[in-house]
């Protein structure tokens, strides 16, 4: 596969942009090759700077549930652009998008639009702290909530109960307020709640984890989080930046039946534009300025072009009742294609991950938390990634990312992918 122009662009990029990319996973370091540069995308296809075509299962890391450049979304955005790119004043579109989000996820009684998932989660945590008057939060190892200081914190090693920063430049002081528990381990949450009685403002969780590969919640795990937060006066925050409008129109609360106090959305809700949202209980969101004392603002918040992309995307999802059934069924077909000894496949709706677990014996079939995800064979994953790419199929360049199925991945393309999987994992 010729990637000459991509190589040239990557060399130029590395002169000016750290690692040549504007978000680290794009550098392809985990799979030992250089990234291709995208020229354009249409439906399920990406086209690179050298004219190669790839069947895309990254879908912009989640937003592309309709495939790339859906004609209705593109047309709506073009129309919006003509009317001006940014006003810093309220628009009817913001009201319509808020009404649509609330119609899909009724728990979101009030919300704010922001520009990234990072901003949404950071703001939701601030609101939880403002509402409860408490400082600490509990998060889970392997859950990703964007790159704000307070959430770039990981569990300390071994028997240490203290969290530590997960990035240089994050003051150790942040780790004091961010406690880390083990995903799917109720006891680890109970212990932190007891040790920090009366101090925990919120438990923030990916209701279906999708940033350590896909790791679904065990039965009862989310219900336990609901119960213990209610008992201790903490809020439950579902970070649905990936799962929102993905697992179902109503996201994780519809998919799992468990309801949170606050929700964060991103990715799909912006239809491919920089837009995210956080919201939930009316009494909690009433803390946000100018109604309340929690400050949060944004020059580009509710940007009219981004809002238009979000509205049109949600419109299509709300109109087309068959879409979730279709994408889930296609993901199920891919799941079946991965099924073999030495692989552990986790799937939730149209999100799936194949973990390379070659020598796991009895334990095979069980990746339930970050520690287990980390034990997978990343070299085997890299080999699989490269074989898929040589066959023109682009899956996420890391064992710790999900495979996203879109409505543009028609059945015939899914079958072609299944064949490639068979040849690439054996
Ligand atoms: C992508 C993601 C974020 C961060 O969103 P950005 O728009 O990249 O800042 C937060 N939480 C989850 C669960 C995500 O998947």
Image (cartoon, rainbow, N blue to C red):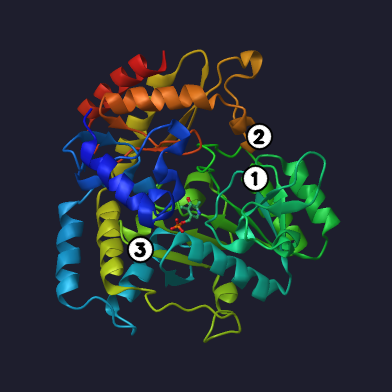
Going 63% across and 30% down the picture, which residue do you hit? Answer: 372
- Which class describes the residues within 10 Å of circle 1: few (<14), some (14-19), or many (20+)? some
Spot occupied by residue 57 in the image (x, y as percentages of width and height) = 33, 37
- Residue that label 3 marks: 274
Report if the CB atoms under discs 2 and 1 are less than 8 Å apart: yes
- Residue that label 2 marks: 371
Q: Earlier in the sequence, mark 1 or mark 3?
A: 1
Spot occupied by residue 379 in the image (x, y as percentages of width and height) = 50, 24
Say which element carries label 1: loop
Q: In this view, does 193 lie to the left or right of 120?
A: right
- Residue that label 1 marks: 141
Q: Is residue 200 left or right of residue 344?
A: right
- Which class describes the residues within 10 Å of circle 2: few (<14), some (14-19), or many (20+)? some
- Which class describes the residues within 10 Å of circle 3: few (<14), some (14-19), or many (20+)? many
Specify whether residue 237 is in view.
yes
Q: Which of 307 and 110 is in front in this view?
A: 307
Specify whether residue 247 is in view.
no
């Amino acid at each position: 596969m010729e990637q000459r122009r991509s190589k040239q662009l990557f060399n130029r990029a590395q002169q000016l942009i750290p690692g040549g990319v504007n978000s680290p996973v794009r550098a392809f370091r985990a799979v030992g090759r250089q990234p291709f540069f995208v020229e354009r995308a249409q439906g399920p296809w990406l086209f690179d700077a050298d004219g190669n075509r790839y069947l895309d299962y990254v879908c912009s890391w989640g937003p592309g549930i309709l495939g790339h450049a859906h004609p209705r979304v593109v047309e709506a955005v073009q129309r919006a652009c003509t009317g001006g790119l940014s006003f810093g004043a309220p628009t009817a579109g913001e009201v319509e998008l808020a009404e649509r989000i609330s119609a899909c996820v009724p728990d979101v009684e009030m919300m704010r639009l922001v520009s990234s998932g990072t901003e949404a989660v950071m703001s939701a945590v601030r609101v939880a702290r403002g509402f409860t008057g408490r400082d600490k939060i509990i998060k889970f190892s392997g859950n990703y909530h964007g790159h704000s200081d307070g959430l770039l914190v990981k569990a300390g090693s071994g028997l240490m109960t203290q969290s530590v920063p997960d990035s240089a430049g994050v003051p150790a002081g942040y780790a004091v307020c961010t406690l880390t528990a083990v995903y799917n381990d109720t006891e680890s949450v109970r212990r932190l709640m007891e040790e920090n009685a009366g101090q925990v403002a919120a438990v923030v969780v990916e209701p279906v984890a999708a940033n350590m590969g896909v790791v679904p919640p065990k039965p009862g795990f989310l219900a336990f989080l609901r119960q213990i937060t209610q008992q201790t006066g903490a809020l439950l925050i579902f970070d649905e930046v990936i799962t929102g409008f993905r697992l179902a129109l109503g996201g994780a609360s519809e998919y799992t039946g468990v309801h949170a106090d606050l929700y964060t959305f991103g990715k799909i809700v912006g239809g491919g534009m920089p837009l995210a949202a956080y919201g939930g209980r009316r009494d909690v969101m009433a803390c946000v300025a100018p109604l309340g004392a929690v400050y949060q603002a944004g020059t580009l918040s509710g940007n009219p072009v981004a809002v238009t992309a979000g509205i049109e995307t949600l419109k299509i999802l709300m109109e087309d009742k068959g879409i979730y059934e279709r994408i889930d069924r296609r993901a199920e077909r891919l799941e079946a294609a991965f099924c073999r000894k030495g692989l552990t496949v986790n799937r939730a709706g149209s999100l799936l991950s194949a973990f390379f677990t070659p020598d796991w014996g009895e334990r095979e079939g069980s990746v339930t938390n970050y520690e287990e995800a980390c034990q997978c064979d990343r070299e085997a994953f890299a080999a699989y990634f490269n074989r898929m790419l040589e066959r023109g199929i682009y899956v996420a360049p890391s064992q710790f990312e999900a495979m996203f199925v879109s409505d543009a991945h028609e059945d015939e393309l899914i079958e072609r992918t299944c064949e490639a999987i068979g040849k690439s994992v054996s």
